[in-house]
Amino acid sequence: MAAITSKEDDLNSNPRALEKHIEHLITDGRAFLKTTGQQLQHMHDGGLLSKGGIRVHKHIQKYENTDLGAKSIIAFIGESGAGKSTLLNALLDYEKIVPTSGMRACTSVATEFSSRKSNMEFEFCAVIEYIDRKEFEEEAESLRYDILDDEEEDYDTESMYTILSSSDEEKEQKPLNARSSKRRRLSNSSAEGAATVARAKLGALFPGFQASDFVEITEKINELYDGNCFLSAGRQIIESDDEEEFVEQIQELISNSGTDDEDEPQLWPLIKVVKVYNVRRIYLDSEILGSGAVLVDLPGIKDCNAAREAVAGKYLAKANEVIIVSRLNRVLTDETTTKLAEMGYSKQLRLDGRKKITIVCSFADQYKPSDARQEYRKNKEFVGKYDELMRIIKSAPRGRQLKKLSAIEKERVLDETEDAKERLQKLCLATRNKHVPGAVRKAYTKHLGEDIQVKTFLVASTAYQVQAGRLVTEERANNSVTADETQIPQLREFCIKIPTVQKLFRMKFFIHNISRAFGAAKFLVEDLGPSLSKKKREGISDELNKAAVAMKRALLTLETNCSDSIKLEIEKLTGETKTLSLDSSRHCAEVQKTVRSGKQQWNYNTYKHICRRNGEHKTDSKKNLNQKYLGALDDGLSRIWGESVGGIHKSLTGFTFKLSSQLTAFEERWMSIVCEYFCHESADMKTSEELVRNTLKAVVIGTQKLLLDQTHRVDEKQREINRQFRSTNQLKSGLEQSYQAAAKLTGKGSYNSMMDVVTNGLKSTTVFLNISELIAKGLADLQVTLKDENTKWCNDIGEELETNIKNWMAVSDKVEEQEYVEKQKLKEILSRFDKTLKNLVDEADSLDGKLTI
């Protein structure tokens, strides 16, 4: 314990030192498991292990193969231009290792950064995953609409409504006039942007591509995939020992800058995800990745390609931490939160049931004192100090007045002025840093839920890179900023801590499992000897077995109660989800009504084009009809999940607490039985007490880990089901016939007719019911998994205790001589490790809670 105490402060503040210490403890633990396992294997090979001994051996093998690696996905999200690339480069301590694209809208792919794998020969490695042939055929259809829509005539709302869809009654109410019937081409920058992206993608893949080539698009796609080994394989590997060469290859592949050969297809439109692996070094970047952190740059979860959208959604659902990057001057505006909503993040984060997020305010170095004066004008204390410093600065002699001063006076004035400026800057930054986190928390809890925890960093990535000598800027004013003031080191430490905290808990669980295995092995070799008569030995054995059986029965009863409680919650959740799906037509009818006659009603042309695209708008996410239908159900789904998931968590927590109480009661019963049969306190009695206490403590910690794992599993199932419910793919497919039939309607009153066709399709579709059935199946599977895990856990505890009792009660003088000799060898191994194990357990317990994030 002295060793850990002397390092306590360092381990608490330094995740790297803590991680090294964890690795040291794990190494010591594995050494015991290896030595003990080898001896047990030797005994097993010689046929010298009883059934109880074989069970102990299996325990040792299971613990020896425990995977203690921790991978934590840290997802970075934010709108284009928020500074994510510069931020990630700074965190990784590289100038430009993060791939960027000349046309971000065209290369909306997730980019993952993780530590280099042991089997990689080169210093830098990237795995490029491509969308498959079928996925691109579906995207090509969407691109076709983008181009054809742009080449068609668009008309204004009034003229198209009057000419094509008005009824006789409407005509009487609003007669035609020259202006309203005149056909006009509308300027639509978003539509033109979508068409530009579509042409860029197809032009890159098929040089010289024209809209007329769509008739042969299937043949062209087949030829492209068949003629490229990377596309056929679905992936491409880029490796290099040279950083610049590696970055250049990545940039060339994912950018749309073209190649020397204009007839050579470029593959960037087909990239699904980029995985970059970095060599583990002594540099800080190796530490952020080597700790187990996986940094993922997510451009958005709304993509015209379902495969890329699924990849982004999967990363977001599994992310251990979500970091939202926003420019400091926009972080508190509706513009940022609106953009996040358009990218699909706000609702996803809310429905995923996340309890915390991190906000990174970028470009924090672009902050002027005048901005602070305006922002915090109501803060009297700040304003008073600000105005006093400004008075000193403004009243300082300058120009001719300064020249009239002596050299000494001039130097004094300049020093005072510079000091006032520096104090002013620090005052403004300190005030900003104090108030922004609270304001950010208030703004984002409004959108993501009041119960969510928000952590904030104000970073200056460019200033950090300049400080590190990687960038040279014309502005030298910020060169005086320290690395810590950029908050990049603090954010890096935060990312490192996330997997380290996981490792800390896994290490504690591992060490206590070793204690559990040690106890089982100790019971195998310990001998009560002549201290007890045969009658007393049998009495202890009988009483302890009865206690073990009773406890096992009690644990299984607890499991049954927990399972029944979870079953009720899942039945309630399944029933309400089905009710919600059956009521979907009413919700969708309300959406149709809003679209047709609401404050922001859509014109005929917009609705027709959306029908042609099976319910999706080419550019405006607010006009995705399928998403609007599902969005009408979101509030109901969020309410249902919030209540039921909370109930499941409560049941699992209650099971863990009551199980721990049962184990404590069993420990007390064990000691009372032993005390009853031993005439006086003996070494055997003390050994028994210590072994049982350590074994049951390890079981309690294992139960806590089981709870943690199951809670994560419930949360992941929640996110998976939310994605199923909110995925527009099934709705798009289920309503395809109705949409296409509606899109073909023209002439008088066709708008109303289109609406009727789609409404009838919504009434007859089974999509919502199918989704609810998929959800029901997923929940039923979850229920079975939780029940099986808890039942197995309870049975294992009971069987382990029964085995320990049987091994302890065995009479050593009845075993064969060779078995006795080998057991003595095992006993010696355990004796040598006894003190080390106690230290390991003490240190594992003392480290608990040393690191917080």
Image (cartoon, rainbow, N blue to C red):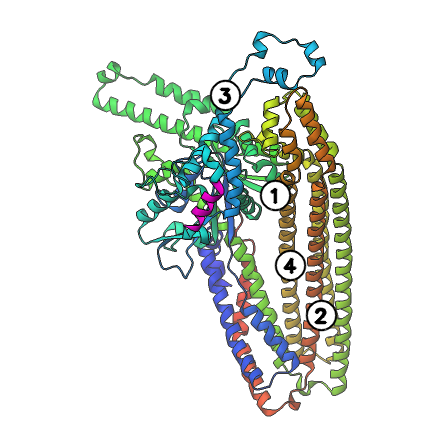
Q: Mark 2 vs mark 3: which is more N-terminal?
A: 3
Indicate the amino acid at tag 3.
Arg
Asked whether 218 falls inside the magenta stretch, the response is yes
Q: CA distance from mark 1 to mark 4?
A: 20 Å
Q: Mark 4 highlights which residue? A: 706
How crowded pointer 1 is (Cα within 10 Å; few <14, some 14-19, many 20+) is rated as some
Point out residue 635 in the picture as x, y percentages from the top left corner. Answer: 69, 35
Q: Say which element carries label 3.
A: loop
Asked whether 608 falls inside the magenta stretch, the response is no
Above or below residue 68? Residue 822 is below
Q: Residue at x 71, y 35 (%)?
A: 762
Q: Mark 2 highlights which residue? A: 798
Indicate the amino acid at tag 1.
Lys
Q: CA distance from mark 1 to mark 3?
A: 34 Å
Q: Mark 1 highlights which residue? A: 355
Q: Mark 4 vs mark 3: which is more N-terminal?
A: 3
Above or below residue 308? Residue 291 is below
Q: Mark 3 highlights which residue? A: 377
Q: CA distance from mark 2 to mark 4?
A: 17 Å
How crowded pointer 3 is (Cα within 10 Å; few <14, some 14-19, many 20+) is rated as some
Q: Which residues are magenta?
A: 217-227
Residue 675, image quadrant: bottom right
Q: Mark 1 vs mark 2: which is more N-terminal?
A: 1
Residue 76's tag is: none
Q: Is residue 552 shown to the viewer in this render?
A: yes
Residue 798, image quadrant: bottom right
Q: Mark 1 vs mark 4: which is more N-terminal?
A: 1
Q: Nearer the viewer, residue 235 or 537?
A: 235
Point out residue 389 in the picture as x, y percentages from the top left corner. Answer: 40, 23
